[in-house]
């Protein structure tokens, strides 16, 4: 059930192409705890995935500085001491994706 906040965060972020090195060496399953993380990009939200992982880390670690890095002033309310999740897929957004999305507005 905790996948919902991550999916929501990824859906609300602007269309940004994933950097090739963001997925380099990716094994499929990642974990974030109060003291460690499998992700190399926590605190560096250069992609939607890194922003979502930073947001999860800010909540798990109750770290206001990490929250502010992704523009969140109040620590999210979901409470966990760790989170294990699986990254299913990634794709580059094209201009056609942007056009299709904005045409609905």
Image (tube, rainbow, N blue to C red):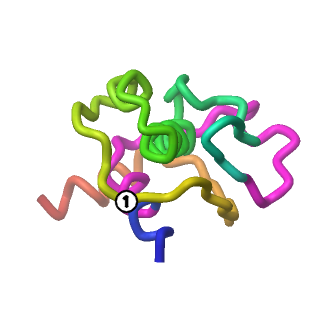
Q: Which residues are magenta?
A: 7-30
Image check: 28 left or right of 98?
right
Of residue 2 and residue 6, the one placed in the foreground of this image is: 2
Which residue in the protein does label 1 denote? Answer: 78
Q: Under tag 1, what secondary structure?
A: loop
Residue 20 covered by magenta stretch: yes
Count of residue discs: 1
Taking the spot 76% from the left edge, 42% from the top edge, the residue there is 38
Q: What is the residue that sits farthest to the bottom in this orientation?
A: 1
Image check: 4 left or right of 87?
left
Taking the spot 22% from the left edge, 53% from the top edge, the residue there is 102
Of residue 96 and residue 15, the one placed in the foreground of this image is: 15
Image check: 53 left or right of 37?
left
Q: Position of residue 9 (x, y in %)?
A: 38, 53
Residue 96 covered by magenta stretch: no
- Crowdedness of circle 1 by 10 Å Cα count: few (<14), some, many (20+)? few
Q: Position of residue 87 (x, y in %)?
A: 68, 60
Image check: 76 left or right of 32?
left
**Res. 90 in view:** yes
**Res. 94 in view:** no
Position above or below: 84 against 52: below
Q: Position of residue 62 (x, y in %)?
A: 42, 38
Position above or below: 32 against 61: below
Quarter the C terminus occupies: bottom left
Q: Position of residue 34 (x, y in %)?
A: 61, 41
Position above or below: 1 against 21: below
Taking the spot 40% from the left edge, 43% from the top edge, the residue there is 15
């Amino acid at each position: 059930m905790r996948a919902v906040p991550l999916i929501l965060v990824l859906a609300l972020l602007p269309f940004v192409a994933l950097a090739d090195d963001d997925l380099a060496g990716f094994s499929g399953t990642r974990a974030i705890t109060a003291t460690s993380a499998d992700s190399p990009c926590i605190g560096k939200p250069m992609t939607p995935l890194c922003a979502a992982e930073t947001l999860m880390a800010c909540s798990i670690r109750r770290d206001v500085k990490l929250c502010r890095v992704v523009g969140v002033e109040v620590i999210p309310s979901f409470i966990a001491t760790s989170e294990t999740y699986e990254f299913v897929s990634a794709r580059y957004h094209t201009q056609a994706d942007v056009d299709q999305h904005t045409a609905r507005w």
